[in-house]
Amino acid sequence: MALLQNILWAAFLLVVVLGFVTYAIYFERKVIGWIQLRKGPNRVGPLGLFQTVADVLKLLIKEDTIPNKADRFLFILAPVITFVPAFVVLATIPYTADWQFADLNVGLLYYFALSSISTIGILLGGWASNNKYSLLGGMRSAAQMISYEVPLVMSVVGVILLSGSLSLNTIVEGQAGGFWNWNFLPQIVGFIIFIIAAVSELNRTPFDLPEAESELVAGYHVEYSGFRFAFFMLAEYVYVYAIAALTTILFLGGWHSPLPFLDFIPGIIWFILKFSSIVFFLFWIRATLPRIRVDHLMSLGWKVLLPLALVNIFVTTIIIEIFK
Amino acid sequence: MIRTEELLLNVGPQHPSTHGVFRIIVKLDGEVITEATPVIGYLHRGTEKLAENLTYTQVIPYTDRMDYVSAMTNNYVLCHAVETLMDLEIPERAEFLRLIVMELQRIASHLVWWGTYLLDIGAMSPFLYAFREREMIINMFNELCGARLTYFYMRVGGVKWDAPEGWIDKVRDFIPYMRDKLDEYEQLVSGNEIFLARVKGVGKYDAQTAIDYGLSGANLRSTGVKFDLRKNQPYSIYDRFEFDVPVQTEGDCYARYLVRFEEIKQSLRILEQAVEQFPEDGKIMAKVPRVIRPPEGEVYTRIESPRGEIGCHIVSKKKPQPYRLKFRRPSFVNLQILPKLLVGETMTNLVTILGGIDIVLGEVDG
Amino acid sequence: MSDQKHVTEMDPKEAKKEIEENEVVEIVEPSPNQAKLDRLVDLVKSNIAEDAVEEAYINELDRDLPSIVIRSPYWLKTAMMLKESETLKLNYLRNVSGIDYETYFEVVYYLLSMSTDNQQDICIKIKADREDPSIPSVTSVWNTANWNEREIYDLLGIQFPGHPNLKRIMMPEDWEGHPLRKDYEPIDPEV
C-alpha cells in the first residue's frame, strides 16, 4: 500500500515538474521577449499559453532520426542518462516543513552526486552522434562540469557547517525567524560562488559553451531530433527547477517568511515566491550577458571560485569556533 | 599508446556565425586552430560579367545586391564613377540627399554589425535593440525611395526621388534620439567584463600588416592609421563638414569595436550639419543624356563605405554599356587576413575575429 | 539629339589625350601631376631598365591620375622598387583589375602610399598576351594581391607565376573556361 502511495506521489511530482517546465519555457520566452522588445509567444491558446504544449507535441510526433554512423546504443541511452538524474534529485527537496518526499540525512550529498551523472549523458550524446560539433560540445561540457562541480560543492560547505547537517530539512529549520537569519547573509561569499557555479552547471548563458550556437551550431545535441532532443531540453529545465529550489533552501530560508509578522502567509507561498525570483534571475542574465570564453571559464573556476570557496570554508570554521 | 590527431572541422557554408555562406575549413588541435582555409564563392553571381551587357543605369540595382547591408554607398560609387568619366556637375540638393542617405546608411550598417557581432559573442538582446534603431532608418529610406533594402535610389547625375514633405525633419529628430540610444548601448555592452575579456587583445595585428593586406575602413583605422577617404580624398561634399576620423592604436577586436562605435557618432555629427545646410529647393538631377555614353577611357573611383574602401573601375568604350566594370569590394579584400589571424586562436575566437572584420558575403563573392 | 551633342563635346578631350600619349611635352596646359609622372618614369627607367616603361600618360578623366604601362618581365622588380623606394613608398595596393581587350589582356594595379604625407595614387598597367597570358605575381610584395590575382586567374585565365596558391576562388574547381573573357561561351547555356 505504502509503495503504491509512493508511486502515486512520484507521478504527481512528475506532473508538477512537467507543468513547471512547460510554463518555465513559456515564462522564459515571455520574459526574454519583453527584455528584447518582442511579444513572445502569443498565438497558441489565450496569451500563447499553449505554445509549449504545441511545441512538445510537435517534438513527439516528429520523425526520430539516428545518424547512420552514430553509435546507436549510446545515442539512444544518452538522453535517458541525462534526464533520469535530473528528475531523481527532486526527491529530497523540502517545499514546506512537512511536504517532502524523502528526508535523507545526506540530502545535499545525494543531490550533488546524482546531478553530476547528467553530464555523462551529455558527453555520451556528444560522442555517440559522431559529429565534430557535438563532440566539441560534449568535451566542453565535461571540462566545465569537472571545473565547476568542485566550487559548487565547496561553496555549500559553509552552509553545512552553520547548520551542522546535510539534511536539507534541517538546513531550512536553522534559518527560521526573519531574513537576517538566512544563510545568504553570513555566507555571502558562498552564495555568490554558488550562484555562478550553479548557472555554469546548468549550461545556461553566460556559461552555455557546450551548446554555444554561434560557434558549435547546437553543441552536443546537433544530431538529436524529436523526443530525444526534448529529453535534453527537459533535463535542462528540470535542473533549472532543481537549482532554483536548492538555492531557496540553502540560502534564502526555504519556506520561512522574511519578517516574523508575515508568518500567517503559508510557507509554500514564500517558497514559490523565492523560487520564482531565482528562476526569473536566471532568465534575466540569459537575456543580458554575452557568452564567456572557454579558457576564461576554466581560469575563473580554478583560479577564482575554488580558492575563494576554500577561504570561505576556512573563515567560516574559525568564526564558528570563536563564537561557539 | 595514446595517439592524438588533428580534427578537421568544416565551418559553413551553412553556419550561424559565418554571416551568410562563408565557409572555412579549420584544423583543430583540441580547440586551438592550427590552420584555416577560407572557401568563398558560394554567392558569386557574376555581377561584373552581367554588367557588361547592361546599361549603366541598369547596373545600379546590381550594386544594391552586392553589399546588401549598405546599398546606398554602393549605388553612389557606381554613379560617382560614371559622373567622373562624364565630368558631370551634380545639383546641390542631390548632393545633400546623397550625403544624408549615405551617412544614415553608415549608421544602419554599423548597427547591423553591432547587433550581429554581439550575437556572435553570445549576447542576444543587443541585436534586437540595434534593429529597432535600424528600422527607423529603413523606414526613412522606404519613404524616400519605396524600398527597404535594395534602394536603387541614386542615378547618374543625381537621385531619383526628392525628399518628401517633412522627411528632413524626421532625420533631424532621429539624431538626438540615436545619440541617446548610443549611450544606452554603451551602458549595456561597452563596459561588460565578459565582453571586454572576449574582445580585448583578440585578433591583433599592427599597422604594417594592415597596410600590407590592403585593409580599409575600421579594420585599418583600428591600428592607428588615420585614413578615411571622406577626409583624405574627399568626394561628394564631405569637405564642407566638420567631423573627426576615429582612430585606435591597439589593432584588436576591441579597437575595431570602438572605432565603429565612434563612427556612428561622427556620422550623426555630419548629419546634423547636413540637415542644417540642406538647400530649400533645387533640382535633384543634373542634365544627363537619356542614353549615357561616357567618353572613352577609364576611371577608378573609391569611396568610404561602412566596410572600407569600395571602388569602381570602369573601362568605357563610349558605349551605353561598360566595356569592363570592376568593383573593389572591401569585404573581399579585408577577409584575406583571416587565415593569418586565426592560427593559434581557439574555436571561440574564430567567431569573434570573423565578426570583427565585418564582412558581407554578397560583397565578398561579388 | 542631346546625345549626339554630348559625344561631339567629348571629342576634343579625346584628341588631347591622344596627343598626350604620344608627346608628353606638347600639352597646352600641363597637368599638375605631370612632374610626378616624369619622376616616376625616371625612377623606373634608372632603377630597373630603360625599356621597362612601355607607356606613360596622365589619365585626365580620372582626376589626372599618373598611369604607366610596365613591360611584364620587369614587373616584379618594379613592384619591389616602388614599395621600397624612399620617395614613393607605395605600400598600399588598393585595387587590382583584369581587363580583356580582345587582342590582349591588361591587369591594372592601383597603388597608394600610406606612409608619406602626400597620398598620391598611381596606376600601373601590365599587358599580357591573349594566347598564353602570364604576369609575374606580386603577392610577395603586397599581400592584397593574393586573392585579387586568384580572382583574375579564375575569371580571366591569366597566369600569375610565383603566386603561392593559384586556384579558382569564385568558380568551382572543375569549372570550364574563364567567364569574364569576352569570348566566353558557357558549356551549358541554360545555367
Image (cartoon, coloured by chain):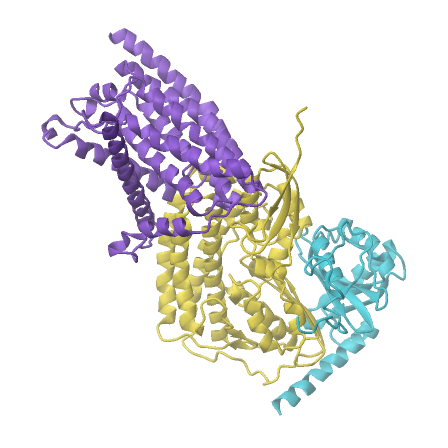
Q: Name the spot of residue C191 as percent of width and height, x first.
A: 66, 70
Residue A113 place in picture, x, y as percent:
39, 23
Q: In the rendering, at what x and y percent does residue A66 appear?
A: 52, 45
Is residue C61 or residue C172 the one in the foreground? C172
Could you tell whether C82 is left or right of B272 in the image? right
Instruction: Pick the residue in front: B19 or B270.
Output: B19
Q: Give me the residue at 40% from left, 76% from top.
A: B280
Residue C97 in percent (x, y) is at 72, 64
Colour purple maps to chain: A
Residue that extends furthest to the bottom in the rendered view of this protein: C1
Q: Quadrant of residue B84?
A: bottom right
Q: Quadrant of residue B324?
A: bottom right
Q: Colour of chain C?
A: cyan
Q: Is residue A176 left or right of residue A60?
A: left
Q: Colour of chain B?
A: yellow
Q: Is A158 drawn above or below residue B33 in the view shown?
A: above
| Residue ID at (52%, 36%) | A73
Please state if B154 lies on the left or on the right of A262 as rendered. right
From this view, report whether residue B223 is shown above or below residue B47.
above
